[in-house]
């Protein structure tokens, strides 16, 4: 599906051009979100109703070209995530970019938010990774490990996301595609760990009580617009986080 780039210059982008636009530098953490025009990040408790066909193209590029997909436990369970299952297009992309055939899922959890029977741990082609803390119950950690997942302790009473990112990179997982949720995004921002925000603005208005894309302690992160694409009334924006 061709889309139009309207910033920084006008151009029509085909599939290969989109792949180049959304490929990762060697060490990079991207956060992906879709929101309505009035800032809602969910409808009926889920983000899927907000997604449009061009959003799904960008969404799949994010995981197709990443070393690992990062999720908060609430999002992983609430949205029913399971392991990545590459189709022919994904397999071709990953082979061309020198990536492992399947990107693992890394889930951030301090304990009860991630049951050991969650599909994100059990319905996978490659073992998932659980990023947790020392205060997480030992029984819980054993149950996670019992699914075949790798359990990484990063921090004492909460997950130290800087330590967690370093642990992923020690395993060769340098290109990180974070797919939410808002609390994890806010925590990553507070730690200065986000390199890029990929924000889809869906052509709808929802009003109501839905939250924003980042939640938690206040931060003052400045963004620089890198590109804007459009297709089917949807805006696809890439922002780089200024240090």
Image: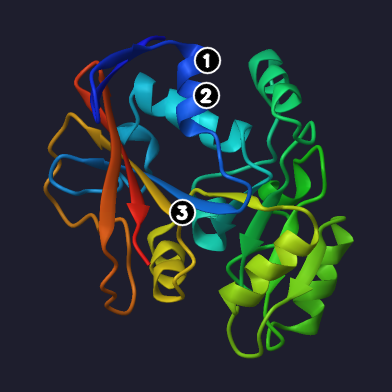
Q: Which disc is residue 180 wearing?
A: 3
First in sequence, mark 2 or 3: give its number. 2
Select label 1 or label 3 by which is in front: 1
Q: Quadrant of the C terminus?
A: bottom left
Q: Quadrant of the N terminus?
A: top left
Q: Quadrant of residue 5?
A: top left
Q: Which residue is mark 1?
A: 16
First in sequence, mark 1 or 3: give its number. 1
Q: Secondary structure at mark 1?
A: helix
For the residues labelled 1 and 2, say whether their Cβ atoms are less than 8 Å apart. yes
Identified at 82% across, 58% down, the residue is: 149
Which residue is nearer to you in this view: 241 or 112? Answer: 241
Residue 77 at x, y percent in the picture: 56, 53
Query: Counting other residues with Cα less than 10 Å from the Cα at mark 3, is it few (<14), some (14-19), or many (20 or more)?
Result: many
Q: Which disc is residue 19 wearing?
A: 2
Residue 116 visible in this rendered orientation of the protein: no
């Amino acid at each position: 599906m061709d889309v139009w780039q309207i910033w920084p210059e006008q151009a029509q982008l085909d599939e290969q051009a989109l792949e180049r636009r959304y490929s990762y530098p060697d060490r990079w953490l991207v956060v992906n979100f879709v929101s309505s025009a009035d800032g809602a990040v969910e409808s009926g408790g889920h983000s899927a109703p907000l997604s449009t066909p061009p959003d799904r193209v960008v969404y799949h590029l994010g995981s197709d070209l990443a070393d690992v997909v990062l999720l908060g436990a609430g999002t992983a369970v609430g949205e029913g995530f399971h392991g990545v299952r590459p189709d022919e297009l994904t397999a071709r992309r990953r082979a061309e970019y020198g990536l492992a055939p399947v990107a693992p899922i890394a889930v951030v959890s301090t304990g009860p938010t991630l049951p050991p029977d969650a599909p994100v741990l059990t319905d996978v082609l490659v073992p998932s990774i659980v990023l947790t803390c020392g205060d997480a119950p030992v029984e819980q950690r054993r149950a996670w490990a019992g699914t075949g997942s790798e359990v990484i302790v990063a921090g004492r009473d909460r997950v130290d996301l800087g330590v967690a990112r370093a642990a992923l990179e020690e395993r060769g997982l340098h290109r990180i595609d974070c797919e939410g949720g808002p609390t994890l995004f806010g925590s990553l921002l507070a730690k200065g760990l986000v390199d890029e925000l990929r924000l889809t603005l869906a052509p709808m208005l929802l009003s109501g009580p839905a939250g924003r894309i980042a939640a938690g302690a206040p931060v003052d992160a400045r963004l620089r617009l890198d590109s804007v694409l459009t297709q089917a009334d949807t805006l696809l924006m890439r922002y780089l986080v200024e240090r």
